[in-house]
Image (cartoon, grey):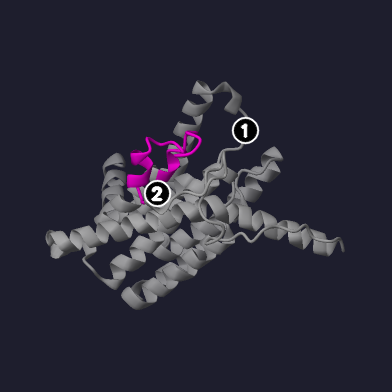
Amino acid sequence: MSSLTDPLLLIIVALLALTLGSFLNVVIARLPVMLSRQWTREAHQTLALVPPTHERYNLLLPRSHCPTCDTAIAWHDNLPLVGYFKRGGRCAQCRSPISARYPLVEAASLVLVLWIVWHHGLTVSALALSLACLTLLALAVIDVRTLLLPDVLTLPLLWGGLVYQLIDHPDRLAESVIGVVAGYGIAWGFYWCFRLTTGREGLGRGDFKLLAALGAWCGWQALPLILVLSATTGAVIGILMQLAIPRLRGAPMPFGPFLSAAGMLLLLGGDRVIELYHHLIGLSSI
């Protein structure tokens, strides 16, 4: 916990966290577009059609630009948090509003990384947990925007959890492997029960892999708590949103953000969260 008592180290970690948050915004904005273009190319190739041509588009190119006027954003306006507030949340060229998602993701990244480093120090474990939480944050925002949980994020998260347990907690590796199987199996079972009962899909297949990944990081014992937290929170927020915004009634609601939030809570709180949960369950059964 003493790692961040040095002001210089605190500044370095904070700047690194903000930089990661800025990159996370790029992933959130561009990854769904990259996947959509890839699927389009594959569909055209399968149908033996000439694939559409697109400009080079990845996480690095083209430069960040205003989505309204297409003006490239200057480097000093692209600084995490600073650039957004310096311009009052508007494009320097056309004055169109810029989504508040950008500073919120950067601020959330800052809080997550500082919390983890404060509790785990400047260790490999802190680095692994930070990357896991930032990946969950990216998945949550992407799911809200597109109803997608890309394999390119969920699968590395899953394997990363197993590698983390193998290196940092080898005595828990078996629990993590069981967690992967149980997480995927539970989501798969719910999907088919709901579909056979209602004729609709209650979960997406990306949710299967996300819950399996959380099983890898947290172990199978944490899955009941993750499901209780995510399902309860999702139900409450879903009902409130539909009451407040009638046009959302009947619209599909992403479950990934609630799974991600529950997973982050477990990763940030560790065994203390599970112990509190077991204590509450014990009290309720008295």
* Residue 9 image position (x, y, % from top left): 18, 63
For this rendering, which residue is in front, 167 or 26? 26
Local crowd at mark 1 within 10 Å, few (<14), some, or many (≥20)?
few
Left or right relative to 17: residue 89: right
Q: Is residue 95 magenta?
A: yes
**Disc number for residue 262:** 2
Q: Is residue 8 magenta?
A: no
Helix, strand or loop for disc 2 = helix
Q: CA distance from mark 2 to mark 1?
A: 23 Å
* Residue 230 image position (x, y, % from top left): 44, 44
Report if the CB atoms under discs 2 and 1 are less than 8 Å apart: no
* Sequence-first tag of 2 and 1: 1
Where's the C terminus, which quadrant? Answer: top left
* Residue 183 image position (x, y, % from top left): 50, 59
For this rendering, which residue is in front, 191 or 45? 45
Which amino acid type is shown beneath numbered disc 1? Ala
Task: Provide the residue span drawn in magenta.
Answer: 78-102
**Disc number for residue 266:** none
Residue farthest to the right? 48
Q: Residue at x 47, y 67 (%)?
A: 178
Helix, strand or loop for disc 1 = loop
| Magenta stretch: dominant secondary structure | loop
For this rendering, which residue is in front, 224 or 143? 143
Residue at the spot of label 1 = 251
Residue 205 image-quadrant placement: bottom right
Q: Is residue 10 visible?
A: yes
Residue 123 image-quadrant placement: bottom left
